[in-house]
Image (spheres, coloured by chain):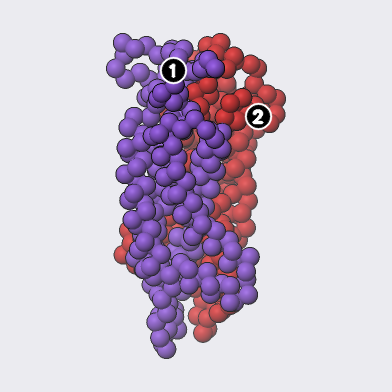
Amino acid sequence: MSMVMVCPACDLAHRRAAPPLQGRTECVRCRAPLQRPESRPVETAIALAICALVLLVLSNAYPLVEMHVNGATRDTTLVGAAWGMYQQHYPTLAALVLLTTVIAPLVQIIALLYLLIPLWRGRRARGQSAMFRVLMWVRRWSFMEVFMLGSLVALVRLSSYTHVIPGVSLWSCALLMIGLSALTTVSSPEQFWAWAEKCPR
Amino acid sequence: MSSPATGRSLGLLVCLECRSTVRNARHLAAPRCPRCFTRLHERKPHSLAITTVLIVSAALLYVPANLLPVMTTRTILDDEQDTIMSGVLELLHSGSWPIALLVFIASIVVPLLKILALAVLLYSAWRRESRLRLQRSELYRLVEFIGRWSMLDIYAVSFLATLVQVKSFANIIVGWGAWSFGAVVVLTLIATRTFDERLLWDAPARG
């Protein structure tokens, strides 16, 4: 490993120091985060990922909200919100909603488990670096927390007209949002490669 | 003042995905990170040109995004068209001002701020401005951080349009305003990625 590290945000060279135990160190010039903790156990991330996976299944299996109007009941699920856009002839918007609220969170969790379970057992996953890049890409397009707030806005707008009941899924979505952000913090790229480099093969 | 040691001056490349530091072997046409195999560049290729194109497109689409209706509420009595701004006003009148403020910030302030901020950053990277570098760098990180929040209205609309489909009572129809708005959000998100913030710190051209 190189004795020098370079700030990805301003290109300033730093002498490599031991990674912090908590919090983060910053670049002395541009104050971008430079190093994050690398000493967490891999089990923490696996446990969080499994927890997030369960919440994701729950979020998709049950309706987000129910609405009663004129004796009729309507509800929608997470996928249903994207499907509604598709039915209204906006396939690009439907794809965007589906990618950012269903596919990206799912792939994010699956890819991490795919990478971490072999590491936990002392081996490297097949195609580790390709999967790592997939993980980094989907993380950038996983917008669960924004979706959560967006559906709250929609609920407020609806509630002035009709009676709406939050479903099971709305609560599990809220927990999933917290779970995913904890998962991203725990399995930072630096931390992931610290785990990976401890495995000989 | 002597210029500080940088990755460029030391011949080192940093991987933007896994943050490993790699010696720049200049004989290789397209070096890759030995750890995660991401393609490495001293600076993101054609960063200023690509980002400019994306920002100009986003700025152009920002006009229909705000003028065209994002959704039309069709009831037995009439059709009510909602633009982003009229949606905010409606929330304000129905008494939920915190939500109205949230939507106003996420849907109107954030996209505009992103477009303007990236335009300013592009200009100063192109001019190689050496003043206020730290502030510019922090502005970039702010844009990066808040970028995703402008998706808020897209989700709200997709939610309403799916739920409010009650025959002989009310239907919500998605409008092209939502499409344009979605395009603005995606274009600015990509533009934030293609902009290389290290260009803000590169030494001025003269002196």
**Helix, strand or loop at mark 1:** helix
For the colour purple, the matching chain is: B
Which amino acid lies under the numbered mark 1 shown in the image of this protein?
Answer: Arg
Residue B33: percent from the left, percent from the top?
42, 20
> Which residue is outermost to the left?
B29
Q: CA distance from mark 1 to mark 2?
A: 24 Å
The quarter of the displayed image where residue B122 is located:
top left
For the colour red, the matching chain is: A
**Residue drawn 61% across the image and 36% down it:** A185
Label 2 marks a residue whose chain is A
Query: How many marks are shown on the rendered structure?
Result: 2
Give above or below for B159 relative to B132.
below
**Helix, strand or loop at mark 2:** loop
Residue at which label 1 appears: B8
Residue at which label 2 appears: A24
Q: Residues within 10 Å of mark 2 (few under 14, many from 20)?
A: few
